[in-house]
Amino acid sequence: MTERRPKPAGRPRTGARVAAVQALFQSEQTGESPEAVMDQFVRHRLGPMEDRGFEDGRVTDAHVPLFTAVVRAVARDGDRVDALIRDRLARDWTLERLDPVLRALLRAAAAELLTPKDPPARVVINEYLDIARGFMDEQAARFANGVLDALAHELRPAEFKVV
């Protein structure tokens, strides 16, 4: 009898967030609608496929409902999301001046923070900072941390009240 080892637990919600950042980046760069890009991701880039992984643009372990919810939230609430981010930038910085991957990451995180309570703001921040460190240098990750922390404190102040 062959011993069956349990499959290591993945991080499907993190995978969904990585895919959302990638999809938002792709939508902005190509001009394709977020819905079209989501469809491409669901059909061709999410889930297991042979031995390929992130290096081939695949996100093998992604929670598809979270992925689609984040991308749709950015598409639906894009003006509000962008205004929230703009309000946290220095006067001489515009949203358009940000690196496009950083912009996609901030948009995805801001859209999640607009959803009250679930997941907690600190979880959202930590997840997107992990992603930032995977795509960007430490300076950009610190910048993202500052923006996301300010957003979280404004959008979910009750989660940061000291009792």
Image: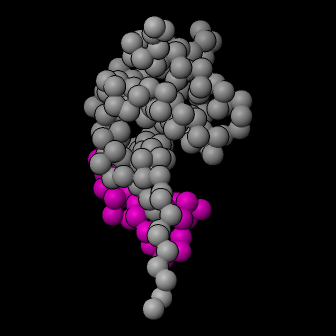
In the rendered view of the protein, which quadrant contains the C terminus?
top left
**Magenta residue span:** 34-59
Residue 73, position in %: x, y? 31, 34
27 with respect to 51 (left or right): left
Q: Given the current orientation, which residue lies at the most extreme right position?
A: 138
- Specify whether 108 is left or right of 91: left
Tell me, yes or no, whether the highlighted magenta stretch contains residue 43: yes
- Residue 163's place in the image compared with 137, above or below, is above
Q: Nearer the viewer, residue 144 or 91?
A: 144
Image quarter for residue 43?
bottom left
How far across and down, in percent of the image, does residue 40 sit? 35, 58
Q: Which of 105 and 11 is in front in this view?
A: 11
Check the image and report above or below for 103 versus 23.
Answer: above
Look at the image and tell me whether residue 23 can be seen.
Answer: no
The residue sitting at the bottom extreme is 1
| 18 lies left or right of 65 | right
Looking at the image, is 48 positioned above or below residue 161?
below
Determine the residue positioned at 64% across, 32% down: 141
| Count of marks overlaid on the render | 0
Q: In which quadrant of the rendered view does residue 44 lie?
A: bottom left
Q: Is residue 148 magenta?
A: no
Residue 153: image location, x then y, percent: 47, 14
Answer whether residue 5 is visible to the viewer in this image: yes
Q: In which quarter of the image is the N terminus?
A: bottom left
Q: Whole-percent x and y of residue 36? A: 31, 51
Residue at left offset 48%, top offset 9%: 162
User: Compared to 66, does 50 lie above or below?
Assistant: below
Residue at 64 percent of width and 40 percent of height: 133
Give the colouring mode of the picture: one colour
